[in-house]
Amino acid sequence: MVFTYDTDVTLAHAAAIANTGPGLGDEDREELPDLAALQAWFDRWEWTGRRPASAAEVAAVHALRPRLRRLWSLRDEALVAEANALLEEGGALPRLVRHGAFGWHVHATSDDAPLDRRIAVEVGMALVDVIRADEVDRLKVCAGEDCEDLLVDLSRNRSRKFCDGTCGTRANVAAYRARKAAGA
């Protein structure tokens, strides 16, 4: 494990939610089109605290996605500045909590804070761990052809190149066919 469990989950969630927009991931459609879809998303990710309750919160999460995507391209002082901005804008007040399988971990917003603020602050807190551990290179963009999905490389040797979609399979099949054609 590179980071604590909650940091791993937060980073994976940030990448996944950034990948839900139209034309991203394996879908050409909006993956979070309405309140019911967003509620199901947060149930699937076992998000704690208040659930989204309005179309305005759906819009706020949609508006946060480009900012999350941009984080993956930042390095050094620019990433530090953005992590600090996420925490400051969200009014982060870290506190220890324990629920579910997480054990003791840090929440930095109240459970009833606006959803987009909660997401942003959780991501900011995870980035603190990433930056302090000097592991920013683990924030990657899929190497698949025509794919711009974000991913978090939590492999031991930092070798992950592809998103959770079909990109890795397509690359492996293409490499296999190229080897077969070269051998023929």
Image (cartoon, rainbow, N blue to C red):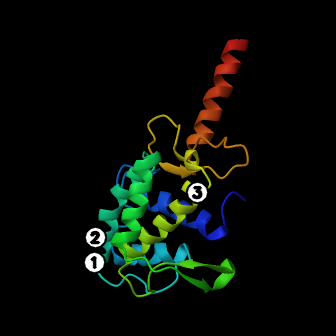
Name the spot of residue 127 as percent of width and height, x first: 51, 60
The crowding category of the residue bearing disc 2, from other C-alpha atoms within 10 Å (few below 14, some 14 to 19, many at least 20), is some
Crowd tier of the residue under label 1, counting other residues whose Cα lies within 10 Å: few below 14, some 14–19, many 20 or above: some
**Occupied quadrant, residue 53:** bottom left
Horizontal and vertical percent position of residue 126: 53, 64
Q: Which residue is mark 3?
A: 132
CB-based contact (under 8 Å), mark 3 and mark 2: no
Q: Amino acid at mark 2?
A: Ala
Mark 2, residue position: 59
**Badge nearest the viewer, 3 or 2:** 3
Residue at 48%, 70% (x, y): give it: 122
Disc 3 and disc 2: Cα gap in Å?
32 Å
Nearest to the observer: residue 90 or residue 170: 90
Please tell me which of labels 3 and 2 falls first in the chain: 2
Q: Position of residue 19 (x, y in %)?
A: 43, 55
Mark 1, secondary structure of its residue = helix
How many numbered discs? 3
Above or below — where is 121 with respect to 104? above
Q: Is residue 19 visible?
A: no
Identity, as a three-letter code, of the amino acid under mark 1: Ala
Residue 172, above or below 64: above
Q: Are marks 1 and 2 in contact (CB under 8 Å)?
A: yes
Which labelled disc corresponds to residue 55? 1
Q: Is residue 137 left or right of residue 17?
A: right
Q: CA distance from mark 3 to mark 1?
A: 36 Å
If you read the primary sequence from the N terminus, does the residue marked by circle 3 or circle 1 appear first? Answer: 1
Q: Secondary structure at mark 2?
A: helix
Left or right of 67 on screen, residue 79: right
| Amino acid type at image mark 3 | Arg
